[in-house]
Amino acid sequence: MTIEDVRKVILNILADIAPDEDISSIDDNTKLRDQIDLDSMDFLDIVMELRKRFNIEVPEKDYEHLATMAGCVSYLTPLLKDRQLAS
Amino acid sequence: MRYDTIIIGAGLSGLAAGIRLAMFDKKVCIVEKHSEIGGLNSFYVRKNRTFDVGLHAMTNFTPKGVRSSPLGKLLKQLRFSHDDFRLCQQDMSEIRFPEKSLKFTNDFEFFRQEVAETFPDQIDGFNKLVEKILSFDELNLDDADCLSSRPVLESYISNPVLIDMLFCPLMYYGNAREGDMDFYQFVIMFKSIFVEGFSKPQGGMPYILNLLAEKFEHLGGELRMGNGIKTINAKQETVCSVTLENEEELETTAVLSSMGYVETLNRCQPELAEAGACETGQVSFMESLFVVDQKPRDLGYDKSIVFFSTQSRFDYKVPGDLIDISSGVLCCSNNFQYPQPPEEGLIRLTNLAHFGKWDGLPRKDYIAAKKECRAQALDALFTFFPDFRDNVVFLDSFTPKTIKKYTGHINGAVYGSPQKIKNGKTPVKNLYICGTDQGFLGIIGATLSGISMANLHLLQ
């Protein structure tokens, strides 16, 4: 998966967990919670979706890396580099 | 085969928890005793008409786009769009006492103005109370101290009638305790009714319940209807299986029960000493439904919901007799902003009732008492409101006994035990409770209860 693919993975997850949100204009360097009103329950969902879709476990101490889109991409790209977007 | 979780009860909390678990590929089965889904918020059919039970209105209305509210959280967690719920807002509701009336809508400032006009000398205190309510963290699951509402209210408001008028809707819509209310419950109810407000889903309870049940099954969840739980079995104080009424045993890693705390403990094998020591709920209701041949509005009923007391002081307690006709809730289902108005007029009247008195009646007397109590309740209502008796084309009533029969809740206690188990834990490992006895009430509250207990205990 490329960096672009990883970004797309996150967007797909966000689209699923927040169906009423406009996610097309997300700024990569602003906190996700400030842009689309995510709370701690939603972050749990992001982590659960990563587990479900890619079998990736994100330990609680690493949740902070998921605060922004840029953070998500840099944290997840090494973990997903050998995977296909379609998986 | 072994389940990850067996959920007891296909009411709103059970269905919501089921959706959360199935969404993340847990092997989950909901076991429901009744042949219909819904539990305390269900529906029934008589003479080709479908009636909701439980639902007068949904509390906690917030518009599309508000995410931090209970409704917004619920929609996100279950992955529904606001439009999926097809919510139609109320017109206007009212709290009516002798000589005093407070109206409210889904705009809180309207209510604040009503209080200011009706109780001008109390508005400063009321505003301070509102500040306290808005800054209170009522959703803290760990908070163990029991603060009562009445002393808090009395410290801000000196007129007892205003205090009773505020209590009336909040108690009727979600208080398991007689006479007073835990303050965190007061805050939950105040926000859900006055600050947020009422709506009804187009299509009523069957629509909402089917929406949840379909999503649950679509995600791979299993729903077993018409088969209750006989025992919840534990080994080494950890849950291991449940035995159904047909003697079938289902193995499971965890059980999430919405049948009530004591009701759950009573079914544990080996037996639990704790079961006998728990407080059970007593508060229940009689409700009558009247299909009328005109729009309620044309009969002089223009409010969505009216909470009334025929006495200047309102007493929320289990009556000494079959029912208490001195206060009640009147719901006109037609007076919500539906895209297409309902075909028939429907008026519902709810009064406090005593389970034991109803349960003790022989069958013949029970039928007669229903008729008699309904007539008494109408007589009391018509001291305040126009008479619609000549316009009734169909009527039906249910009592605490009916509620017990279909939901299994001890005493037909609609709001469960006064003692809530906020963290959902029981003495048995991997056995948790959700729903009415966990502490979030109402349709939105029950649904959030299922979600939060699934998240807290069964997903991480």
Image (spheres, rainbow, N blue to C red):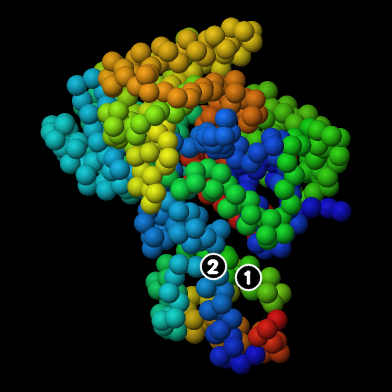
Work out how far the residue at label 2 is from the one at label 1, CA to CA, in angstroms. 9 Å
Q: Which residue is mark 1?
A: A49
Q: Is residue B321 above or below residue A46?
A: above
- Tag shown at residue B340: none
* x then y, percent, for residue B114: 19, 37
* x then y, percent, for residue B57: 42, 40
Image quadrant assignment for residue B172: top left
Say which label, 2 or 1, has the lower sequence index. Answer: 2
Left or right relative to B115: residue B420? right
Q: Chain of mark 1?
A: A
Depth order, front residue of B229/B92: B92
* x then y, percent, for residue B123: 17, 37
Left or right relative to B125: residue B395? right
Q: How many marks?
A: 2
Residue A62 visible in the picture? yes
Which secondary structure, mark 1? helix
Depth order, front residue of B109/A70: B109
* x then y, percent, for residue B10: 65, 43
Q: Mark 2 or 1, which is nearer the eye?
A: 2
- Tag shown at residue A17: 2
Give the class, few, some or many, for how many residues have Cα within 10 Å of label 1's Cα (few <14, many ≥20). Answer: many
Image quadrant assignment for residue B344: top left
Say which amino acid is labelled 1.
Glu
Which residue is drawn at the image coordinates 69% and 77% (left, top)? A54
Say which amino acid is labelled 2.
Ile
Which residue is drawn at the image coordinates 64% and 74% (left, top)? A50
Depth order, front residue of B419/B65: B65
Give the class, few, some or many, for how many residues have Cα within 10 Å of label 2's Cα (few <14, many ≥20). Answer: many
Image quadrant assignment for residue B104: top left
